[in-house]
Image (tube, helix red, strand yellow):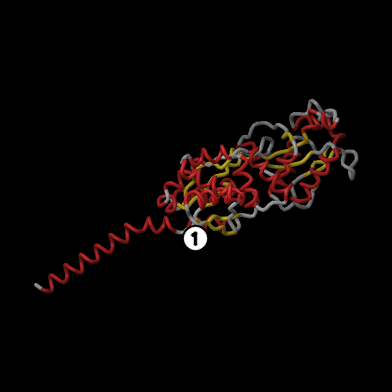
Amino acid sequence: MKKNFLRKTILIGVCMLIILTVETLPLRAAEEKVTFIDFSWDSVQIHNRIAGYIITYGYGRETDYMFAESLPGILGIERGDAQITMELWADNVHEWWQKAQEEGKVVSLGENFPDAPQGWYVPTYVIKGDKARKLQPVAPLLKNVKDLPKYWKLFRDPEEPSKGRFYNGPAGWKVHSINLNKLKAYNLYKTYEAFDPGSQTALASAIASAYEKGEPILAYYWEPTAIMGKYSMTKLEEPPYNKKIWETTRKCAFPSAKVLILANSQFVLSNPDIAEFLKRYQTTIDQNNNALAYMRDTNSTVMETAIWFLKTYSRVWKEWVQDEVIIKKIEMALEKGDILG
């Protein structure tokens, strides 16, 4: 009898311990620090701190930021070493993303901003002029890449004066060879020479220099970026993206690039309030361009830029939160000038 009683007592005790452990798991998870993965580009770091500021001062959770390259970073979220990154460029890690969705260890909480554009740009004043700078439109009919042969002299290459210059992406980038294929597909080699700027900085500097002087320039670029926020640039039209054409000649527009908010699945289950806020988190290309331009022009840190965004676009983030108590907490932190490390 004593043995049976002892066994029952032990069994009940074990069951109670299991129940208590299971019941407290979500609570413990909800009390843990929220860690964001920072990648090497500015926009993701700004968004991580915008979301981090809201989570810290609105939801009362400690936040941290861990730097990693793309694949190690998303694998860290998959393992639970970190919980969130505000920019997953899913097309760049297509195979991993397909497998990750099947395994269910990570989840997309929606798109941070609309499909990110990339392509061939010219300053808008080339097409429309600029009255404030007394610049006349020098190529008013330039709308499509197919129009470029008529205007090669505007973009004359100083090293190859018989051709126009097209500023390509640096040789180490995948897009470098893509653009060379495009030049061939559009039969532009007769009138244009591809120029390798050597680095992203050099490419941005070439665009900035030409723009400040009011000169024509034809260059590959993408959004959101500081350059696109600071200067008015127009992307030339191409035939609509077609998967078959893209995989053969490249004679079509670039495929759209989806930029998702990525989170660890267990974190989402344990933190439904934060997850709902992140599901409503959405920005525009213009807002991103403006934030990046502000950061560059004022030499601000990513955290300072995040706070500028929260103050500048208060109506936007309040739509994400939709809780008056939490909104008030964030407003008070901004008014006091609280800044995360």
The front one of 106 and 165 is 106
Answer with the quarter of the image where residue 118 lies: top right
Q: Position of residue 309 (x, y in %)?
A: 62, 44
Residue drawn at x 79%, y 43% is 208
The front one of 156 and 110 is 110
Residue farthest left in this picture = 1
Q: Report which residue position mark 1 lands on.
A: 81
Q: Position of residue 250 (x, y in %)?
A: 68, 39
Instruction: Please tell me how crowded label 1 is: few (under 14), some (14-19), or many (20+) other residues with Cα within 10 Å.
Output: some
Report the side of 8 relative to 289 (left or right): left
Residue 330 appears in view: yes
Residue drawn at x 76%, y 52% is 199
Report the side of 290 relative to 159 (left or right): left
Relative height, residue 151 to residue 222 (above, below): above
**Rendered-image quadrant of the N terminus:** bottom left
The front one of 54 and 329 is 329
Residue farthest bottom in this picture = 2
The front one of 197 and 182 is 197
Relative height, residue 32 to residue 226 (above, below): below
What type is the residue that disc 1 sits on?
Asp
Q: Circle 1 sits in a helix, a strand or a loop, which is it? A: loop
Q: Position of residue 83 (x, y in %)?
A: 49, 55
Report how many numbered discs are placed on residues in the image: 1
